[in-house]
Amino acid sequence: MKKIFFSIILWFSFLPIPLASIYYGPPDGKNIIDIGSPEGYLFKVEKGVFVQTHSEDYILGIARLIEQLKRTRTGKAIIGQVSSYQPISLPTKPRALAFSDTRSSLQAIENIHVVIRPPSGGKRFVTEPLISHFDFAPHQSNGLGVPSVIYFDIENTVLIPGSSRAIEPAVALGHELIHARDYLSGGLPVGSQRIRHRAPQQGVNHIGEEFEQGDMVEFNLMLREFEATGLSYQKSVTKPKELTATRRQSIERRESLLQIWDEARINKTVSKADYKRVRTNIALLKSEKAVSEYHLSLELEADTRDMYWPGNMISYASVPAEMPSSDIGSAFSSTSGVLSNVKINTRVLGEHLSQYPNSVMLISSSLIEQQNGFPRLNKTLKTAIEVAVKLDRPIVFLQGDHFSTLSRSEQTMTIAMLEKSISSLGGNQKILTMVSHEQGELGGTGRYLVSNSSQISILSARDEMVTLEISESLANSSQKLLVSRLGGISFKPNVLPFQQRLRWSSLSENDNVTLISNSELPKSKKCWSM
């Protein structure tokens, strides 16, 4: 079986370990699910939580917010709840699914708990049930549960009514995920709570009467918003670590369904597997932690709101959102230290170079750091060069996308530095040959060496177009190709543009192409992309 080793490095904000892995390739029915929708594939960002979009920036934005949430007690609890809780059914009856009649397997669809989408049709910061048939609508509040969809805006947020302070995006996402938790557990609060509160700004009440800032206004607030906002905690009606009375009732309603399943198990009308799944999921409720927007705001040291005002009563002012940025973003504003956290897969690289005596290694200029006009070899590249030298394999210098932007002296010093490095490691190669790729043709003094090699190993920045073009050209030959794409030093750490992503995906299907992983990444920190 062909092995494809491929991983891209992303720099996420607020991560203890600033690395996360991205699955890159065609839909696999697990991390990328194709539901045959024009709105795009589903990308897994957490267990049970998927993002549906065509925008790589949107995937990255949601992933950053989720990582920010997971750094707090409440955020971690919320993510755990939406990841673990799932819709259940009555014995012998179907459970609510997010989609039906898709090209994906039933098991893949069953694992979809929450789908997050960009704003659409005027919906933003809105959570709704996501069901394949209207018959499942009652499940959102009867304890059985349904999947949900969140329409979320990462580009804009809103001001807290009556102030110039904005609701932080992570807090807003946490609020919507609490609604998703309620949908999944069949515990969406129904009804309303009578509220009497001083208006932070002018507006209109439920019967069309205008009120001014400072007026005492009475209105009915949907109980689900009262609960998600955490007003019971903020008004000290409920202790911070206790569940509200409404949430306890929802949990008791779901737990009561176990009695029906117990009877079905005794009567042998359900399978052991189905019974175990339902019992296990219901048991999770016993350890549920209290969560709310109020909890989250305190832990994130964000501004809190003392009331939830419905949008049909007051106008919310929209402002650009300040999304969390990478802690190490400064590394990309210069060209130093970018590869310091990248581990090259020397085992796979060595195996390929040794397996083919007539092999060659290409090193792209995009991986050579420039500090104050002087080139610098990172330890990662020194390791790769050492592997090639020990195996007595020639090294060819690949002129990357931005090599031509260097001054003549910088180009000369870069080449001389590489030659000196090869020599210092005991290499027999005295002169470094070079290759370039222009207008679909391979050029430079090393083109014949590359063209006549049975195997080529390429080391380059992950977002370099020259490497992609050369790889596509070589993939059409009988030559074996190994592509090792590392964190680039010249580009901001964005997810690959759509067209590049598709081209790399197509390239990975070739039998003579191997894409290798270059880092040991934490399995618990994943954002998935095509």
Image: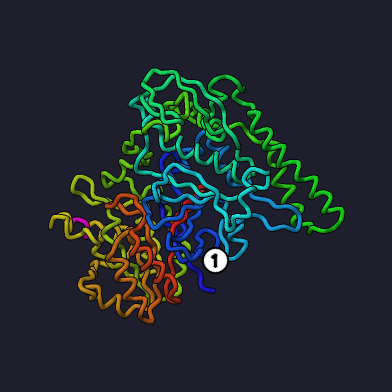
The picture quadrant where one finds residue 428 is bottom left
Amino acid type shown at disc 1: Thr
Picture residue at 36% right of the left edge, 33% below the top: 315
Q: Where is mark 1, residue-wise?
A: 102
* Residue 210 to residue 343: above or below: above
Q: Is residue 337 left or right of residue 65?
A: left
Q: Residue furthest left?
A: 408
In the rendered image, is residue 332 in sight? yes
Outermost residue, right side: 266
- Image: magenta residue range: 412-416
Position of residue 391 measured from the top left corner of the image (x, y, whole percent)? 40, 68
Q: Horizontal and vertical percent for residue 396?
A: 28, 68
> Which one is nearer the viewer's eye here, 470 or 117?
117
Verify whether residue 229 appears in magenta: no
User: Which of the two residues, 151 or 292, is positioned nearer the viewer here?
Assistant: 151
Q: Quadrant of residue 530?
A: bottom left
* Whether residue 47 is visible: no
Q: Residue at x 52, y 41 (%)?
A: 177
Whether 132 is drawn above or below 355: the answer is above
How many numbered marks does the figure carry?
A: 1
Q: Give the secondary structure at mark 1.
A: loop
Magenta stretch, main secondary structure, is: helix
Q: Quadrant of residue 248?
A: top right
x then y, percent, for residue 261: 79, 50
Looking at the picture, tell me which residue is in the foreground, 400 or 449: 400
Q: What residue is at 23 percent from the left and 70 percent from the top?
A: 437
Position of residue 352 in the picture relative to residue 240 (left or right)? left
Q: Residues within 10 Å of mark 1 (few under 14, many from 20)?
A: few
Indicate the position of residue 176 as horizontal and vertical percent values.
50, 40
Q: Quadrant of the N terminus?
A: bottom right
